[in-house]
Each structure stands twice: as C-alpha cells, then as structure tokens.
Image (cartoon, grey):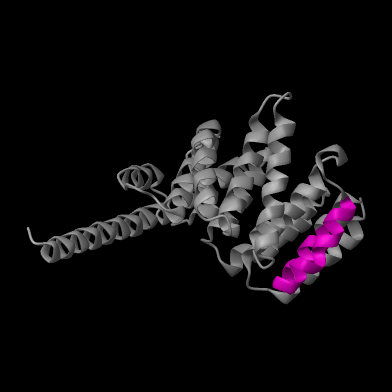
Amino acid sequence: MPIRKLIVFLTLSLSSTLLGQSENFERANVLFEKTDYPASARLLESIPNKGGREWNLAGRNYFMLGDYKRATESFEKATAIEPRSSQHWHWLGRTYGRRAELAPFITAPGYASKARQNFQRAVELDARNIEALNDLFEYYLQAPGFLGGGLDKAQALIEKIAAVDPVERHWAMARLAEEKKDFSTAEAQLRRSMELAPKQIGRVVDLAKFLSRRGRTQESDAIFERARNLQPNHPTYLWERANLLIEQKRNLPEARQLLQQYMGTKVNPDEDHKEEARKLLAKIQGA
C-alpha cells in the first residue's frame, strides 16, 4: 500500500475508533443518569485507552454500586491523566471518605486524612466547586482536630461558599451554629435560607429535619406538609419524610406509602437512595 494511502487509512481508522469511544461514553453517561450503574460500568469496561472522563464515570458507577476499592482505583487514574480537574479530586475525596466510614478503626484515620487532602485539592483547583466546598466544610465540622478538622476551619470556608451561592451561606452558618449548640441561630439561618429560596424543596426539608432533631415534632410535620404542598412527588421530600418517620417509629403505613412512591420516581444519582429504600420497605413490611 502506498504511503499516502496508508496514512489516510490509519487516520480514518483512528477517527472511527475515537468516534466509537465517544459514542460509548455518551451511552454510558445516559445509563448512569438513569441510575443503571451496572450497565454503564460494563459499557465503560469495553472502552480501550480510557481518558480522564471515562475513568471518572467508571469511578462514579463503582461508588454508587458500593465497590469503593475499584472506585478509588478509577479516580486515581482520572487524576493521573487530568491532574487539574477539580471534579476528579473531589470524587476521590468522597470515595476515601466513604471508605473511612466503613473501615476498621486502625485504617479509618488514614482514609479520612486522604479524604480531606483530596477535598482541599479540589477546592484549590476550583474555588467555585460548591459540592467540594460543602464536603470540605462538613469534614471540618465533623472530624477531630488530629485529623485536620475544626470549627475555625469550617468558619473560614463560609465566605467562599457565599461567593458561589449566597443562599448556601445561610445553610453553612446554620450547620456551624448547630455544631456549637447555638440552636436559635441555626434555626434563624435555616429559615432565612428557606425565605431566599422558597421553591427549593431541599431548603424546606432542611428546616423540617432540624425541627425534628430538636424534638419539635408538630412544627416539623407542618414544615414537611409545606414541602408536600410545594412538590408532592419530589424524591427529596418522599425519601426524607419516609426516612424520618421510620427513625421515629411512627406513621409507618404513611412511610411505606412514601417509599413506594419514591421507588416509582425518576431520580438522578445525587438523589438515589433506592437500595436503602428497598431495605427499609422490607423492614417495615406489614406495618
């Protein structure tokens, strides 16, 4: 074959391979958004020479499937290929955080420290990555000082959160106040958050859950009713209300109905608690 024809043939072959890889990635991404994680993962496994986006999506699939070791390996490959991607480092941090939650005492601190380091790296790379900011904020709130946590560090992040989402600032201030046992300030901040974004179901549910934690059940129920009137079939309302009722061991028939509704809703991966919902339904069957 003449050299010119060979070059044309190789170029066309490479273009065809890249096109096929891109199409498979897009199909895998659609499957992920539909929460069909096994099918998405299988499709990604068939893609040779994966790039950062493919390894990131593979990692998110494994994360949602609870295979945190393979998720870690996938996100580490993504960060190696694209070290300037805030998203890759953030997901690697989330995965180490989940491994810390599940690990024995002897290995948990190491995983927790890696979670913090990766959250910090994600925020350094993109100060507008609100999900990374929130996860780092929660880490600082919850982790002890010897693992790099601290309320002062959480406080320092609030203005960075506010620069991205002014409403989220009030949620962060409420979380910090609650950790400090300043419950009146926490409630005021959650109410302010809800006032500023009255149609965001999550803001309403945040207040309802806070009131429940404070033992103010009737007030909590009233706020949950407000959420129901706002968006009765929203996955966040259905899941959070059902989960809380089961925790409190009351109105279990209502909780069962809410979970059944939730199982029939279309959820995105960030709202996907369907495996947990199945277990809860089995637990309260016949209640």
The answer to whether residue 84 shows anywhere in this view is yes
- Residue at point 53% right, 48% down? 80
Residue 165 visible in this rendered orientation of the protein: no
Depth check: 46 or 162 in front? 46
Which residue occupies the extreme left position in the image? 1
Is 164 part of what is drawn in magenta?
A: yes
Q: Is residue 173 magenta?
A: yes
11 shown above or below 93: below
- Count of number-bearing discs: 0
Relative image position of residue 87 (x, y in whole percent): 57, 57
Instruction: Pick out the residue farthest to the bottom.
Output: 196
Q: Position of residue 129 (x, y in %)?
A: 64, 64
Say whether residue 133 is left or right of residue 5.
right
Residue drawn at (66%, 28%), measured in percent from left and top?
103
Position of 273 with respect to 193 (left or right) is: left
The quarter holding residue 227 reads: bottom right
Residue 131 percent location from the top left of the image: 64, 59
Residue 179 versus residue 185: which sits nearer the camera? Answer: 179
The N terminus sits in image quarter: bottom left
Percent x, y of residue 234: 53, 61
Please tell me which residue lies in front, 252 or 60.
60
Q: Which residue is rendered at x = 82% and y = 44% of the image? A: 148
Identify the residue shown where x is 75% and y is 51%: 138
Over which residues does the magenta segment extend? 151-174
Quadrant of the image for the C terminus? Answer: top right
103 or 47: nearer the viewer: 47
